[in-house]
């Protein structure tokens, strides 16, 4: 009875080993395909970027067009990477048009909070009133392509699309790599179980 139980356990381990090694091979194949696609997408992105620089001029598509410190432009990441448990995901937000709020609107909001106009326009120290024409700019989400102009060549937008896809492939590749490591750890654990069972089995 003990021999049958040992053989049954060994057969189960063998089956689990087969399944585990198949999972490892499939993940390795998926990772290779992902890296090849990433290479192609990156090459296409650089090719389209070079074409855009040729059309617009080297100085028109360079780091000089990027917002720098001290400018009024707020740089907001449109795509961020977040991690939940063992998986990475991309979170993307769409660019929006600039939104400006006048001081009159601010007064109206303040009045809704039971504060008088006089307290908003002039404080106790008698400072001058804030003009109604003053605009308070809200944070703006700008499409990075617009840093290089309004009428940019299609190649520049295509390059942006290529690099967005490349970023997605990078995240996919990392997730596949993590799953591959987990599958390899599972396979190695099953090998140890198999070795233990074979050492415990009585000699025939």
Image: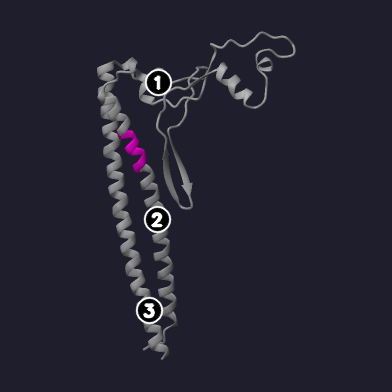
Foreground tag (3 vs 1):
1
The vertical placement of 14 against 116, above or below, is below
The vertical placement of 80 against 21, above or below, is above
Give SS at disc 2: helix
Foreground residue among 109 and 164: 109
Residue at 29%, 15% in the rendered image: 57
Label number found at residue 179: 2
Residue at 67%, 19% in the rendered image: 116
Distance (Cα) linking label 3 and label 1: 62 Å
Distance (Cα) linking label 1 and label 2: 37 Å
Tell me if residue 72 is in the magenta stretch: no
Label 3, residues with CA under 10 Å away: few <14, some 14-19, many ≥20: some
Label 1, residues with CA under 10 Å away: few <14, some 14-19, many ≥20: few
Colouring scheme applied when the structure was drawn: one colour
Give SS at disc 1: helix
Q: Position of residue 94 (x, y in %)?
A: 40, 32
Residue 133 shown left or right of residue 162 in the figure: right
Are the residues tagged 1 and 2 within 8 Å (C-beta)?
Answer: no
Q: Which residue is identified by label 3?
A: 10
Foreground residue among 18 and 107: 107
Q: Which residues are magenta?
A: 162-169
Residue 53, quarter of the rendered image: top left
Q: Position of residue 129 (x, y in %)?
A: 64, 10
Are the residues tagged 2 and 3 within 8 Å (C-beta)?
Answer: no
The image shows a total of numbered marks equal to: 3
Give SS at disc 3: helix
The vertical placement of 196 against 38, above or below, is below
Q: Which residue is identified by label 1?
A: 63
């Amino acid at each position: 009875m003990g021999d049958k139980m040992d053989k049954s356990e060994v057969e189960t381990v063998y089956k689990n080993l087969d399944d585990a090694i198949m999972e490892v091979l499939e993940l390795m194949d998926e990772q290779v395909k992902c890296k090849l696609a990433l290479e192609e997408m990156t090459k296409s992105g650089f090719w389209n970027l070079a074409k855009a620089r040729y059309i617009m001029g080297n100085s028109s598509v360079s780091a000089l067009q990027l917002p720098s410190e001290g400018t009024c432009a707020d740089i907001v990441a449109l795509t961020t990477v977040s991690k939940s448990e063992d998986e990475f995901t991309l979170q993307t937000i769409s660019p929006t048009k600039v939104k400006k709020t006048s001081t009159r609107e601010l007064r109206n909001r303040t009045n809704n909070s039971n504060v008088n106009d006089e307290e908003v326009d002039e404080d106790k120290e008698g400072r001058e009133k804030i003009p109604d024409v003053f605009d308070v700019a809200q944070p703006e989400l700008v499409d990075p392509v617009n840093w290089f102009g309004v009428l940019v060549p299609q190649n520049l937008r295509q390059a942006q699309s290529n690099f967005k896809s490349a970023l997605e492939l990078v995240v996919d590749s990392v997730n596949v790599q993590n799953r591959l490591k987990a599958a390899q750890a599972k396979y190695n654990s099953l090998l140890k179980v198999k070795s233990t069972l074979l050492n415990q089995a009585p000699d025939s």
